[in-house]
Image (cartoon, rainbow, N blue to C red):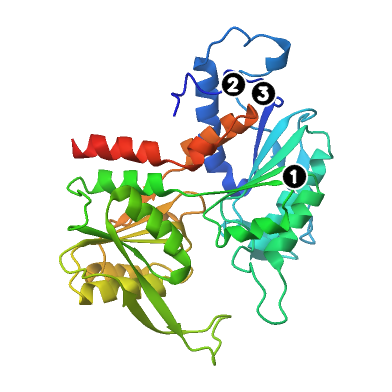
Amino acid sequence: MQTTKERCIETIPVGPLGLIALDSHKELGKKVNDYLVSWRQERNHEHKNSLSFQGYERDSYLINAEVPRFGSGEAKGVIRQSVRGADLYLLVDVCNYSMTYNLCGYTNHMSPDDHFQDLKRIIAAVGGKARRINVIMPFLYESRQHKRTGRESLDCALALNELVRMGVDNIITFDAHDPRVQNAIPLKGFETVQPVYQFIKGLFRAVPDLHPNKDTMMVISPDEGGMGRAIYMANVLGTDMGMFYKRRDYATIINGTNPIVAHEFLGSDVKGKDMIVIDDMISSGGSVLEVAAELKKRKANRVFICSTFGLFTNGMEKFDKAYEAGMFDFILTTNLIYQTPELLQKPYYINCDLSKYIAYIIDTLNHDASISSLLNPLDRINKFLKEHNS
């Protein structure tokens, strides 16, 4: 992959770059903006001052936008500066439950539905004046409702269709629960990005004595649905892999799902090996902790849990107890969704920052260049492992 100074200088930008970070993702938006500003100030080429590159180098690419609310709880999207002809990138975190608003004297925490409505309000405020609208939604809204079993709504497909009808050209998400939801919008851009490189980099820097091979390490998928990401990680690390099969009670429904009766393991002997358990999200955490306990029963050595989205819907107490009991050594999640201050202070937590990766994607797409090398980080992983092993 090209270096920062060499990237994206052979093509004309689609339009002046504009970044709208909704309140749910202000912090990540600022980090992404800092990278973009730094790179474009360093980048020198002969056409930089031409009309086609007007507004290419600026002090900030963040567009001033907000969503004020009325006393009734209703809201409106407002953009405070011109976006005519711009190539816009909207960044939203639908899982940021820390945000609140007042409704008839009551304080309400914002749900994913509220954040999705705010995203649509900002798109509506653009009013079709932008040259292109790209939505970066790391946790894809309603991605867990990706298929129909019985008389159910297909909420993810409906949401994607709604965004496309409003004029969105590209939707970029991370580790979609089922990438096949892109079939709902076959004529528009949809990319689901895997943060495997960031997990490897974060884990190996925190635990320098890791040296992956088939005799010392295994990659574990906690269920059959996550086999793809586990196979990929095992292949790039050169290790063996295993998986757990969730045996469920399909006669019972608790909190909208069928409860898990048992975890059945499929794979080779794990005794004495380091385990990397990789999944797309940690919700309540019960499933991944049961997997860690099962691995320890089979006399695995260290257990590292990697998950793109750390929701931790039932708090951190059970993780604290499991850590004290030696069930796992580290948990790695990304800053793609809201992280509580409590989580960031945990001794077993490793935060994987994706802001630079997102900035790379935005910078490349703004030049209408291919992002294939960004979506497949094999070369970067091999380079990092070579440096680590040496």
Callout 2–callout 1 Cβ contact below 8 Å: no
- Judge by depth and name the residue closer to the eye, 16 or 157: 157
Of mark 1 and mark 3, the one earlier in the sequence is: 3
- Judge by depth and name the residue closer to the eye, 205 or 113: 205
Could you tell me the amino acid type at mark 3? Answer: Pro
Callout 1–callout 3 Cβ contact below 8 Å: no
x then y, percent, for residue 368: 65, 29
Q: Quadrant of the N terminus?
A: top left
Q: In this view, does 252 lie to the left or right of 102?
A: left
Query: Gap in Å between the C-alphas at discs 1 and 3?
Result: 18 Å
Which residue is tagged 1?
168
Which residue is tagged 2?
59
SS for callout 1: loop
Which residue is tagged 3?
13
Which residue is rendered at x = 48% and y = 49% of the image?
194
Q: In which quarter of the image is the C terminus?
A: top left
| Location of residue 243 with respect to 250 vertically, above or below | above
